[in-house]
Amino acid sequence: MPVNPLPAIMIEPLVRAALLEDLGRAGDLTSDAIAPDDLAATALLVARQAGVVAGLDLAALAFRLIEQRIEIVRERGDGDQVGPGDTIAVVHGPARAMLSAERTALNFLCRLSGIASATAALVAAVRGEKARIVCTRKTTPLLRAIEKYAVRAGGGANHRFGLDDAVLIKDNHIAIAGGVRPAIESARAGVGHLVKIEVEVDTLAQLKEAVATGVDAVLLDNMSVEELREAVAVVAGRVVTEASGGVTPETARAIAATGVDLISVGWLTHSAPGLDIGLDFRTR
Amino acid sequence: MPVNPLPAIMIEPLVRAALLEDLGRAGDLTSDAIAPDDLAATALLVARQAGVVAGLDLAALAFRLIEQRIEIVRERGDGDQVGPGDTIAVVHGPARAMLSAERTALNFLCRLSGIASATAALVAAVRGEKARIVCTRKTTPLLRAIEKYAVRAGGGANHRFGLDDAVLIKDNHIAIAGGVRPAIESARAGVGHLVKIEVEVDTLAQLKEAVATGVDAVLLDNMSVEELREAVAVVAGRVVTEASGGVTPETARAIAATGVDLISVGWLTHSAPGLDIGLDFRTR
Amino acid sequence: MPVNPLPAIMIEPLVRAALLEDLGRAGDLTSDAIAPDDLAATALLVARQAGVVAGLDLAALAFRLIEQRIEIVRERGDGDQVGPGDTIAVVHGPARAMLSAERTALNFLCRLSGIASATAALVAAVRGEKARIVCTRKTTPLLRAIEKYAVRAGGGANHRFGLDDAVLIKDNHIAIAGGVRPAIESARAGVGHLVKIEVEVDTLAQLKEAVATGVDAVLLDNMSVEELREAVAVVAGRVVTEASGGVTPETARAIAATGVDLISVGWLTHSAPGLDIGLDFRTR
Amino acid sequence: MPVNPLPAIMIEPLVRAALLEDLGRAGDLTSDAIAPDDLAATALLVARQAGVVAGLDLAALAFRLIEQRIEIVRERGDGDQVGPGDTIAVVHGPARAMLSAERTALNFLCRLSGIASATAALVAAVRGEKARIVCTRKTTPLLRAIEKYAVRAGGGANHRFGLDDAVLIKDNHIAIAGGVRPAIESARAGVGHLVKIEVEVDTLAQLKEAVATGVDAVLLDNMSVEELREAVAVVAGRVVTEASGGVTPETARAIAATGVDLISVGWLTHSAPGLDIGLDFRTR
Amino acid sequence: MPVNPLPAIMIEPLVRAALLEDLGRAGDLTSDAIAPDDLAATALLVARQAGVVAGLDLAALAFRLIEQRIEIVRERGDGDQVGPGDTIAVVHGPARAMLSAERTALNFLCRLSGIASATAALVAAVRGEKARIVCTRKTTPLLRAIEKYAVRAGGGANHRFGLDDAVLIKDNHIAIAGGVRPAIESARAGVGHLVKIEVEVDTLAQLKEAVATGVDAVLLDNMSVEELREAVAVVAGRVVTEASGGVTPETARAIAATGVDLISVGWLTHSAPGLDIGLDFRTR
Amino acid sequence: MPVNPLPAIMIEPLVRAALLEDLGRAGDLTSDAIAPDDLAATALLVARQAGVVAGLDLAALAFRLIEQRIEIVRERGDGDQVGPGDTIAVVHGPARAMLSAERTALNFLCRLSGIASATAALVAAVRGEKARIVCTRKTTPLLRAIEKYAVRAGGGANHRFGLDDAVLIKDNHIAIAGGVRPAIESARAGVGHLVKIEVEVDTLAQLKEAVATGVDAVLLDNMSVEELREAVAVVAGRVVTEASGGVTPETARAIAATGVDLISVGWLTHSAPGLDIGLDFRTR
């Protein structure tokens, strides 16, 4: 899926910090000792397995923050599907700097492409149904903005980005408030007019109470496919419905077929394996 | 595996940044609106699947940086094995703050426990052999220190922490230097006496050249079990041998049985799934 | 208005930076030279004019970050109305540190109380009508979180906190999109389910198009009271209506009487004068 | 008033932080969704009221840090007087980025221009007298350097920049020291030879004691015009005289006519309203 | 010399950064591996040579930021003279943490004590004369505030702290301005009333021009003792006189005897050797 | 000695912070007031004494971060020997900016060149022997990476960079462990395969125990030349030998003649005097 890039100002601090984490106090001992400082090289970012690319801006920045003379020519863009052996980009410049930046560039690219690929797989699984695949706040600490970006690159959509941009009333909030209705009413009274409210419900009774009280969305937590279908019928299109729990590429289609609007998946960001991408130096 | 804790000064900046990432500009809209500010609560950090715990210091800090009155009593420590349903720690304090810190605490704890658990599984797989399980530099950007800590908590050992604390001569370095021997010699001339040198070899010829030139360790890259066994015989204990590539819980034992000293596994840090741990608020 | 406090972790970096800005490279030359280091003092934070207090947490932190032995006893809280001469808090501790922190504490407290007071005046002006007073993104750079907090302390509500937590389609967006409808449709397709959409309209024709297309709120920009009344009639409660432009304590009531839901006011945060609050050292 | 620019290295961190504050974790949802990424635009920074411009470097940096291809052609410079409708600068580049940076650029520009304009009004009010208009430390936390710059752009001068670059002995210091003379003597003994000393006096007796002891300047606090005139006579040019308190565009001239050297005004930086400046996209 | 402490908020960021610089990504490998985590120890900070102590707050903070249970009991304070073998402080707490913090604590303490000691030696050399020993801006990058503090602890005084707190007109400024007088006049017109102006002069002609134009101080650069004496006579107490260049413990007295007010010494901060201080663990 | 440069990304934060430390809140008052903003100048970085240059990248960055139009043409490089009067580089650009950056550029350049020069002097003293000169962790807080770089520029080598990249077992560790052997064994068990282990020994008995247990290097602490010679004989090439303590340009040769591999010198980084380098503006 084509995806709007994040402004460089948002990703540069991350890439800078990651490079410094790797360079430590002495820099790249190996490449400094072995690679002559005037040697140029060309290398290919190559996919070693099928998936969807995400994170090229971060990878490119990793190379260029180490050495601004490095040039990156992209053959694919974020959101593009690639197959094993496909060249994603060509990197050209001083060999030493390319070697020093390689791991940081790949660490970003493989992780984000892994998230995009896992998202894309789920999106493909539900194709034909209206359900969208969305991520959660179960993201890697410090990387939320770019992980949610990767979900978009994979064709998914984003749930809230933090505690402060939407209300999500969970079971503990309901317990504290003394019920679904008072929880929703407290939330509505406490937030601004551009803040949406979603409530997690475990039962149809809670669901009906939520819809009657008035919310923007309901999170149908860990319901079976049958329960989901019934919940969708109860809601009857009045609010957005989100299914959560037990979502895998195998189960996604059946869940989507219940008619829910959204399927949220925590493991997209906390447990999706990285996509295997390598940097192949061309034979000189 | 009991593991030495990281000094708080090393982990506090990460936890602080992660909390601010989640709180955003308005804080926890939901809990602020619903939870009375004088309500106390008790909650349990509970494992939902079997694994090894890591990251309790970070989780505890997440709670206490939001609200210093929160108390955490640990029933397990980092490196401990837990089973489904086991209580890891009891958290007590103001309910609102506990709800606000919950996701950040869990994001650290689940990720690091996932790494520790995957490590422990490999460690268990090679039990009885001398081979140690080690991680790589394929870590999450910005989290290397704590992810390598998690590997230790799982009973693994750490490969180098960055480009600057050891020399690792890879295939591209060898190509640039014009051979294994000149690469090693350049490296030896360029670094201090407390820097070890490891070289990646793809063939027995390279291996022999490396051992003859003098290195501290050899990385036997993507060799079959038979090749590894032959390589170990060639080395004959003169240098540390590290096997890399294709390591899974299923293949680890056979690889270990070749007699290699180390088995390095990139996916421990880039692709291990999080361990499912939840925060259960006790019924009040 | 009682208001939920911001977590200390959110405000501490601001207070710390402000203190360092004032201490510079040599600290408080005057107080260091004159005040004996063992002299204790008591001082009162006193309102010199009527208004609403906001920012006590920041003021208290300013004192305590310089010297943790300083104690602050609050007689009023954020959101409380005060009159000239009213004591807001009593500060007790080492005199030198109190003098060093005084200006930073007051700079936060006076500014935020000024915003809260201006908000409260508008809130009072529209009392009896349903309209709420809301702020905008015209905030002081770097202080948005605390300035929006001050608006809440004054009884107002918050519009969006940034470019990323809601959609606000303005005239330039409409021009680029080629109309109200395509702008709204592009926005709806591009954002997640917890993101609300508001559109700025200048005419009744645009308003009707917006309501028909489906949005969460409409911003009625610089309309006369008559136009606002007509717009409210057109909307007929289907979406939230926000009036903007030309709002003063004198005009607010008439605007509110048109039946709009919200009245947004940029000058609350960019031009409200500080509330005059002083620190009076008690005669010793 | 022409004014020396601040080095970019001093203002860039502020602009960068302000942009990130507005972009949040997801960037500009509205413009990303609506503006095609290849659309260019031209817009004018236009004054909507009369005043003095300050902050163009910060505004320009806001645009360029988001997107370095944006070009800004200035028709006016900092310190220039503008009237309603005057074009200050022309901004040209990718439309989406211009929309994303607009609010941050204006937040800096309007605030600083407001300070410069208020300063210029006071400067105009005292024209013909020798008195200079100076600011205080009652600045917005974190923005002191640029707010004091804005005062210079408006033709004013700067009082001390912090606690550490000059001594200002206030009433509480005098009380602690046990008098004007011991306070001055302690200060003189405690600071270096390039540190000036000013003392705040409330009475002519204190004034005489200060001048006799030897200071660089006296702050005549909240004195009436008659008292100021008498104080100036007492001082007889031996030290710099500064009047403070109750300064408005209406009272400034009379205060200046007393012959004081300086008139300091806290509200220039804590309460001056922003200057209304807008960004008008040209009709396409 | 007793000296006012710097607020902890000013030194904590330096100590924190220094500890993290030493701990790197893995912490203290040696102490973690060898010292049991429950072992307590006592150690003495002992002077190995005579000198003046400075930096105890930083050393103490180094220990306590690693481990807040460490207690430091001071037997000497900053500014105190010590002899070889003198105990400066007793440190007690967990052995492992003490070992981890040792080098950082000593790096601050030895450097700052070295500066204080060198200053004190010059102060002693000029005892009986009115001349004060002052430092310059030739400080270690990032450590200016604490190095100037160390000069004060040694009994010296501080020249300006940066480019922004006083004017120092040097030879290149004079050349650009076209003479001493126009340089001073430009400076006077450009800065606020609390900014002092010093001018560097190489000849008596320049000196006379400077004094006639009106400055606060003159820097007599690299003049011989005879020239200095003549310069002091020319000045006749009208402005502060500062001698600079060629100052050593051997030459200082003769320079002071010329009657100059100040003797400035760059090497105090850029080349003073560290004072040898060690941490002796008590025999257990 | 030619030396590999540090990546700009590693040094830029230091230079940026140092410039801001000097510019403070108001910038360069003197140069702003006196130097016209369109005046160009040319100046020479000139050695005033013999030595080895180090830090040119930092000096150049200081100029260019203030004003990117400044051009620096190097006539010498880091690691080059210079004599009094030698031009190191030519700096050309706006005069005002060059004056503002001058002190920061020189503070880095003089300090690092001082370290390089002191190192080179020791290297020269031991020429002909195999011993290498190495630095320690007794570096200036926050400047370790660049000070160790300066040692390399002077022809020396680096000891470990922090607590985390090698094990150095000191006397206190041995005391805690209960002997040399258990200390080494604990360390070996606790660290990864790329971590070397060195142990400090005070006696031949300890030395023999260390060599027998197996370490990578031994630190022969404060031994006399005779003891060193005996120690070297005992070791017989089996491990790296490092002499430490009492090393001066006078004693170095005799120490080297004992056959040790390394001579470590703390004062290279904590007490080497700066090299006198000035910036001479050419007569215009």
Image (cartoon, coloured by chain):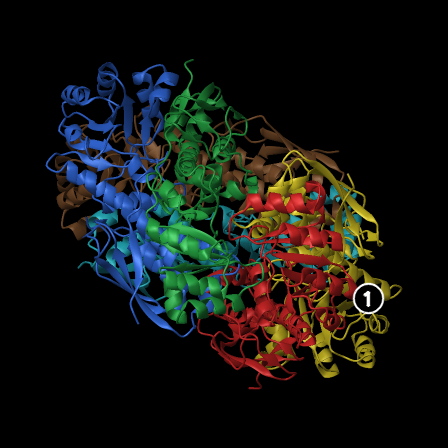
Chain colours: A cyan, B brown, C yellow, D red, E green, F blue
Residue at image position (76%, 70%) is D251
Q: Is residue D175 left or right of residue A132?
A: right
Residue F236, compared with residue C230, is above or below; it is above
Residues C62 and C149: in front is C62
Q: Residue at x 20, y 58 (%)?
A: A39
Q: Residue furthest left?
A: F128
Quadrant position of residue A52? bottom left
Q: Nearer the viewer, residue C1 or B124?
A: C1
Spot occupied by residue D1 in the image (x, y as percentages of width and height):
57, 75
Q: Residue at x 19, y 26 (%)?
A: F239
Q: Is residue A209 visible?
A: no
Q: Position of residue E278 (x, y in %)?
A: 39, 26
Label 1 sits on a secondary structure element that is loop
Q: Is residue B284 visible?
A: yes
- Left or right of residue C1: residue D231: left
- Against E6, residue D217 (above or below) is below
Above or below, C120 against C210 in this view is above
x 55%, y 63%: residue: D19
Q: Amino acid at mark 1?
A: Ala
Residue corresponding to mark 1:
C131
Residue E203 position within the rendered picture, expressed as x and y whole percent measured from the top left: 36, 60
Residue extending farthest to the bottom is: D284
Nearer-the-camera pick, B85 or C101: C101
